[in-house]
Amino acid sequence: MIPFRSQLAIASGNAGKIREFAEYLAEFNLVLLPKPPAVDVEETGTTFLENAQLKATAVAQAMGEWALADDSGLEVAALGGAPGVYSSRYGVTDADRIAKLLAALGDATDRRGRFVCALALADPSGRVVLAAEGHCDGEILLTPRGTNGFGYDPVFWVPDLGLTFAEMTSAQKAVIGHRGRALAIFLPQLRSLSGMLRDCT
């Protein structure tokens, strides 16, 4: 097995996601490498986990590095689970996506939604060695609130905190957010894996 190195490719060009991963993975002292624009991964999976695995495999093989991918998005009950795996393709910009979502919901009284995050780690050969999934339940507001975060964060309200994702601190999102919850499952696996790989070298 190839030793775990100091570099980790992140299968995303989204600067917001890479910043979050830098915080979550700080203990590993890794240099995070963004996905090169030339590496275009077709997200043909029907679930978030399938897409995360596709992205991790493709980026690992293209870059010859360990690669971490996430696929995340918003599922809204009144919209039959939409936008779902198409969350990032629901519009051209974050503002477009939010506007389309709010227009689709209209004045619906059922505004339940949940954020989902799936994580997958592939070795340089493209073999997926770790995977995890996390969820966060909430509601879709009528208008955006807050300036932090990205994507649908300004309209995703978590009743337990009385805040949208865009009003939360990074520390709050790390505990309650879908990515934070997925990482709570994923990080112990990563610690174990990195320890085993060190022992093999």
Image (cartoon, grey):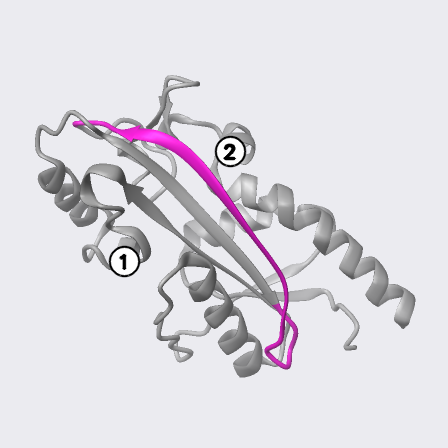
Q: Specify the quadrant that holds the N terminus.
A: bottom right
Camera sees residue 20: yes
Q: Dot 2: what SS?
A: helix
Circle 2 is placed at which residue position? 170
Q: Residues within 10 Å of mark 1 (few under 14, many from 20)?
A: some
Tell me which segment is drawn in magenta.
Answer: 122-142
Most prominent secondary structure in the magenta stretch? Answer: strand
Q: Which badge, 1 or 2, comes first in the chain's sequence?
A: 1
Q: Position of residue 78 (x, y in %)?
A: 20, 38
User: Would residue 48 appear left or right of 176 to someone viewing this image?
Assistant: left
Q: On the image, numbered disc 1 is attached to which residue?
A: 86
Q: Position of residue 33 (x, y in %)?
A: 56, 66
* Residue at 37% across, 26% down: 167
Left or right relative to 44: residue 5: right
Determine contact: label 1, label 2, CB under 8 Å: no
Q: Nearer the viewer, residue 177 or 12?
A: 177
Magenta stretch: includes residue 128: yes
Q: Nearer the viewer, residue 127 or 145?
A: 127
Using a 10 Å C-alpha cutoff, classify the residue at mark 2 as few (fewer than 14 neighbours), some (14 to 19) or many (20 or more). some
Tell whether position 61 is magenta: no
Q: Marks 1 and 2: which is nearer the front?
A: 1
Note whether 19 is above or below 121 in the view shown: above
In the image, what residue type sits under mark 2?
Answer: Ser
